[in-house]
Image: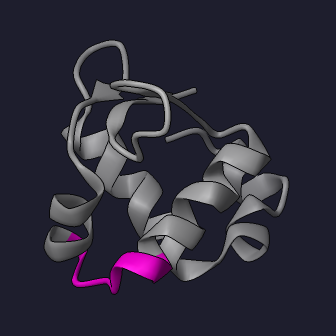
Amino acid sequence: LDTRLLREGWLARIGSDALSTLCFLVLAGDERGTSYWGRDRMAQTLALERQNLDRALNKLLDAGLVAHRPWREGSPDGVWQVL
């Protein structure tokens, strides 16, 4: 994790669910920061309701902190990468 998250105020902007989701993606990711966990499994592991996880992931995407490539068009699951 980069100290800019603290210095530039990202922690307050993204909120606690998005922060825990970001930490999860960092820990679950490989050396390139990519992970392949499905949303249901992420939500279960983080003890979040699925809709809260979806909001958290959207916040991270909107903030440009992560990237997502779905397995196929319209699929919510796919590859996640911490940027």
Q: How many marks?
A: 0
Magenta region: which residues?
46-52
Q: 26 or 61, which lies in front?
A: 61
3 sits to left or right of 27: right
At a point 40% along the width and 40% down the height, the residue shown is 75
Looking at the picture, how far across and down is residue 31, in whole percent?
27, 14
Which residue does the image show at 41% across and 61% down from the upper left?
A: 21
Q: Nearer the viewer, residue 57 or 65?
A: 57
Report the residue that reaches farthest toward the right.
8
Q: Residue at x 34, y 45 (%)?
A: 25
Please state if 15 lies on the left or on the right of 50 as rendered: right
Q: In the image, residue 16 lies at what x, y percent?
A: 54, 80
Q: Residue 58 appears in which quarter of the rendering?
A: bottom right
- Which image quadrant: the C terminus? top right
Judge whether residue 61 is colored magenta.
Answer: no
Q: Position of residue 81 (x, y in %)?
A: 44, 27
Reply yes or no: does residue 50 show up in magenta. yes
Vertical relation: 68 (above or below) 10: above
Nearest the viewer among 80 and 15 is: 80
Vertical placement of residue 12 versus 34, above or below: below
Depth order, front residue of 36/21: 36
**Point 33% across, 42% down: residue:** 77
Q: Is residue 38 above or below residue 16?
A: above
Whole-percent x and y of residue 62? 76, 49
